[in-house]
Amino acid sequence: MVSLIVHAVLGIAVVLWIVRSNPAIFRRPAAGPSFSTLEIAYLVVGVVSIALGWWFNVTFVLDYGPDRAFFNPLWGDGSWAQYLELMFDNPAAGSAGADFTVANVVVLPLLTIVDGLRRGIARPWLFFVATLFTSFSFGWAFYLFTVERQRRVAASSVSDLAPVVP
């Protein structure tokens, strides 16, 4: 269980690092509500994905881990190694596991790094790092939240600068 708590702390730390690295994006928009409906939707999807993942991860550690709070999270019962082994336990699980792994380890970093740099998002590689401690879906949802937030903050700043026509 200690490894899950460490994951939670690291996940929160990475999200805060992203936010603090991009203060212009995460500031309150000059006009409109603090959060748009779309931003809220992305955040809800991301948080729900973490909750679902945590439910299964806690169940995995309780069901497969040893009966003590401190154990090796890298190999042995209830470890990352056993988790990965079970992720490819049968062809159906292996198909989903392979698809998830490619999407999380290749597609998400490529998209967030290339697109993020083009958009001027600082440290876009952190969205991938966040998935290591939160969930794959949270990384995607938080990136899309960030892009939408950036668009909305920029639009509200431009509308503030637009000349008023009498």
Image (cartoon, helix red, strand yellow):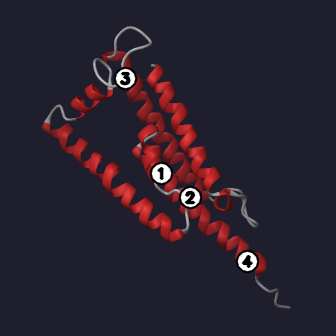
Callout 1 crowding tier (Cα within 10 Å): few <14, some 14–19, many ≥20 = many
Mark carried by residue 73: 3
Looking at the image, the residue that sits furthest to the top is 67
Residue 135 placement (x, y as % from top left): 43, 41
Task: Give the vertical position of 41 relative to 91 (above or below).
Answer: below
- Read off the residue under disc 1: 127
* Mark positioned earlier in the residue sequence (3 or 4): 3
Image-based side of 88 in relation to 70, left or right: left
- Read off the residue under disc 4: 159
Q: Tell me where residue 96 sits by quadrant.
A: top left
* Mark positioned earlier in the residue sequence (4 or 1): 1
The C terminus lies in quadrant: bottom right
- CA gap, disc 2 to disc 3? 32 Å
Image-based side of 75 in relation to 146, left or right: left
Please say if the residues under marks 4 and 2 sit with CB atoms less than 8 Å apart.
no
* Mark positioned earlier in the residue sequence (2 or 1): 1
Amino acid type for the residue under numbered disc 1:
Phe
Callout 4 crowding tier (Cα within 10 Å): few <14, some 14–19, many ≥20 = few
SS at circle 3: loop
Amino acid type for the residue under numbered disc 2:
Thr
Task: Give the vertical position of 162 relative to 85 (above or below).
Answer: below
- Read off the residue under disc 2: 146
The N terminus lies in quadrant: top left
Q: Nearer the viewer, residue 33 or 127?
A: 127
Image-based side of 111 in relation to 148, left or right: left
